[in-house]
Image (tube, rainbow, N blue to C red):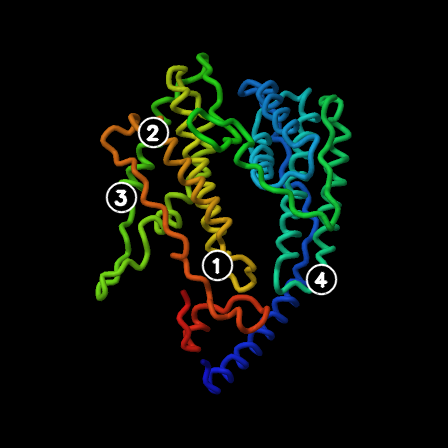
Amino acid sequence: MMTEGMKRSVIIILTGIAALVLSVNICTAAFAPEFEMMPLSMKTPSDATPYNDEGFIIEADSMVNKISNSTIPTGTKLSEVTDAYYRLIMENVSPEFLDTANNIVGYLFYTSQAGSTYKEYHDYLKSVSRTSDGSEYYTLVDQYTQVAAEFWNRISDRYPNATMYVLPSASAPMPTDESSTDGNILKGLETGIPMTQKLPDPTAPDQTESVKTSVTRWFEDYVENAEPDEVDPLTNEVKTTAGHLFLTGEGLQWADSTYMDLISKNVAEDFYEKAQYISAFFYLISQARESYQDYIDDRTYVSSVSYGDENYEKAKKYYNEAEKSIEYFKDVMSGTNNTLPVFPQFGEVALAGSEWDNYGAFGYITDSMAESLGWNAE
């Protein structure tokens, strides 16, 4: 039971939070979402290297078809669109194909912006500190969609069996993320990989050894030398598990860029299958890190409306899939530890202010606030 002094402390803190929320709202109004123009278009064609119109078309057509005949891309599809845009603008295409290429990357960029802002719109609707109906976000999504439609009109003749994605109404729920079934599903795995290893090209330099070196060094640096459990020297209790340290550590910050780098490598045909699983590992472990960070945010942000269980389960699934993929290429890292740290238990990340729900809908109280009140945040 709370003492009168503790109740007064709560009132003081509530007043402080109310002032903080007000200041945040003012800042939010000052930094309302604004329309962003496409920063980069196709690079200028250069005859110093071969033109790659065909390679551009294969990847672009695959991406455009994937987001067609559906609603605005979200989740994994949205990430794929963004990645495709940044990859395609770096392709060296012929001068004759340049205008078409620019229209395609323009379509992908504004689609990416529309999808990202649409997610922000739904995130804002769930925020306990929102001060509007979110129409400023939805209006911006609509603007991005209209610009994307202009580019679609310029390229739609290339896709006679496709229609542009549609923007759901403002009252429609956020589409579910079908990431587990999108993409190429490798044997033994259940999660689709959006972009897999490029097909072997016997006329290009063989980069097989480069792939082997990259994956071996990564496991040496971040798995073999992973930080152990952080233990309290007085009580000998584990304060932070090795799994949590691994998921939030430096190594996984590089996983996504490593994935994007490896899938572009030209490997020998007899190594192609292993290379696919290597790339899949880095994709899956990067997704595990991203979902785990979302789980942390769910449990620690003042404006959070979730206990983090959904993102925790997503992170765990990606992590388990990454572990399974290792079985298909572990012989590449002979003598190197390839066993990932144990995935952390749910709740290792403390829910900020577990008793806060008794005091209204302001959100979760932070650990420092809970400590000042004499509460134990668990």
| Label 4 close to label 1 by CB (< 8 Å) | no
Residue in the picture at 60% in, 18% down: 54
Q: Separation of disc 4 and disc 2 at Cα?
A: 50 Å
Label 4 SS: loop
In the displayed structure, 37 sits above or below 234; it is: above
In the displayed structure, 203 sits above or below 137; it is: above
Question: Circle 2 sits on which residue?
Answer: 327
Q: Separation of disc 3 and disc 1 at Cα?
A: 29 Å
Q: Residues within 10 Å of mark 2 (few under 14, many from 20)?
A: few
| Label 3 close to label 1 by CB (< 8 Å) | no
* Disc nearer the start of the sequence (3/1): 3
> Which quadrant of the figure has residue 23?
bottom right
Label 3 SS: loop
Type of amino acid at the residue the image marks with label 4: Ser
Question: Circle 3 sits on which residue?
Answer: 225
Q: Is residue 291 left or right of residue 41?
A: left
x, y (%) of residue 243? 34, 48
x, y (%) of residue 110? 68, 39
Q: Is residue 289 left or right of residue 79?
A: left
Residue in the picture at 35% in, 47% down: 246
